[in-house]
Amino acid sequence: MTEHDAPGPADATAIPYAGLTPDRLLDAVESIGLRCDGRLLQLNSFENRVYQVWLDDGSCVVAKFYRPSRWSDAQILEDHEFTTDLAQREIPVVAPLLIDARTLHAFEDFRFALYPRRGGRAPELEDSATLEWIGRFIGRIHAVGAVAPFRERPALDIASFGEEPRDWLLAHDSIPAALRPAWRAAIDQALDGVRRAFDETGEPSQLRLHGDCHPGNILWTDDGPHFVDFDDARNGPAIQDLWMLLSGDARAMSSQLGDVLAGYEDFMEFDRRELRLLEPLRTLRLIHYSAWIARRWDDPAFPAAFPWFGTERYWQDRILELREQIAAISEPALVA
């Protein structure tokens, strides 16, 4: 997910990774003193470009090339500092490698970082012990995140995840004209509900978060979970790193939440008022997601991955989704 992106013209200069050829990628890695054997494997990532790179000694690293103009150097380094701090406390996160006393490197027009390769499989979220184990480590992450906020990275709030994406989509005529009134009515009503929920909750906690703690960013091994991709790390309420682990109806989610909090509260107290923000935060993520795809449309990876985006059917589904969220926001808060 993304934010604070200035839209660029739809020409070759707007294609962020056009110049990142395999040769240039290998040259970038070798520019910091590593020797590559020429083998590359592109890994699944839309926002950045991520590759597994084999070295001459038979080992491999993961090279992450950051999307130009998304984060400042200072904001990237806050991600690196946070994950390094967590790793030093033996919390299972994948932190960037320190090479020549730096974690962030530059080569020509690209900034990149190298990470150790860490494999794993998807966690079995239907298992209560797995959820408790994951909750325990998120609690440890949040205990560190509560020590001090990010200084450079933004907060997850209604303005940046709801209002600004809405305004951008309208300003760039992203919604078909015939559907624009219905979409505008639905999104404005949804955001009114989000604002009421935040007002009723009071001032939520502002921790340093993973920010995008969905199951795809949790890899499981025989030793338990480890957390990857802190690229969306930001300040926000603790519930943001918990709700994406929950699925199903209210009864199922209540049971899952109880398992997660059983582990979480071994290390970090959870403010039950934040449960009122679960559906509002889901709503903000859905709004933000459509704008994220629209902003990235000049990147060839996006039309290939989201061929249905921008069609009337796509926006009809989004209107229905928003109406469902309006109803969900009005329901009583989940109880663990």
Image (cartoon, rainbow, N blue to C red):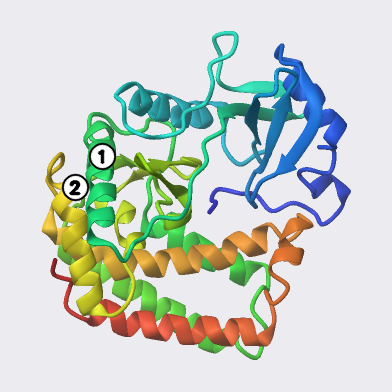
Q: Disc 2 marks which amino acid?
A: Tyr
Q: Which residue is mark 2?
A: 264
**Residue 167: numbered disc:** none
- Position of the C terminus, as image quadrant, is bottom left
Q: In the displayed structure, does residue 239 sit left or right of residue 75?
A: left
Determine the residue positioned at 76% across, 16% down.
Answer: 35
The residue nearer to you, when weighing 8 against 268, is 268
Up/down of 202 relative to 148, above or below: below
Disc 1 target residue: 142
How far apart are the alpha carbons under marks 1 and 2?
Answer: 9 Å
Residue 43, x across and y down, in percent:
66, 46
Q: Are marks 1 and 2 in contact (CB under 8 Å)?
A: yes
Residue 157 appears in which quarter of the rendering?
Answer: bottom left
Q: Secondary structure at mark 1?
A: helix
How many marks do you count on the picture? 2
Image position of 282 with respect to 146: above or below? below
Q: Along the horizontal axis of the image, is 284 left or right of 97?
A: left
Residue at 16%, 62% (x, y): give it: 258
Image vertical order of residue 17 relative to residue 309, above or below: above
Residue projecting furthest to the front: 222
Residue name at image x 22 percent, y 44 percent: 136
Residue 254 in the image, given as x and y percentages of width and height: 19, 70
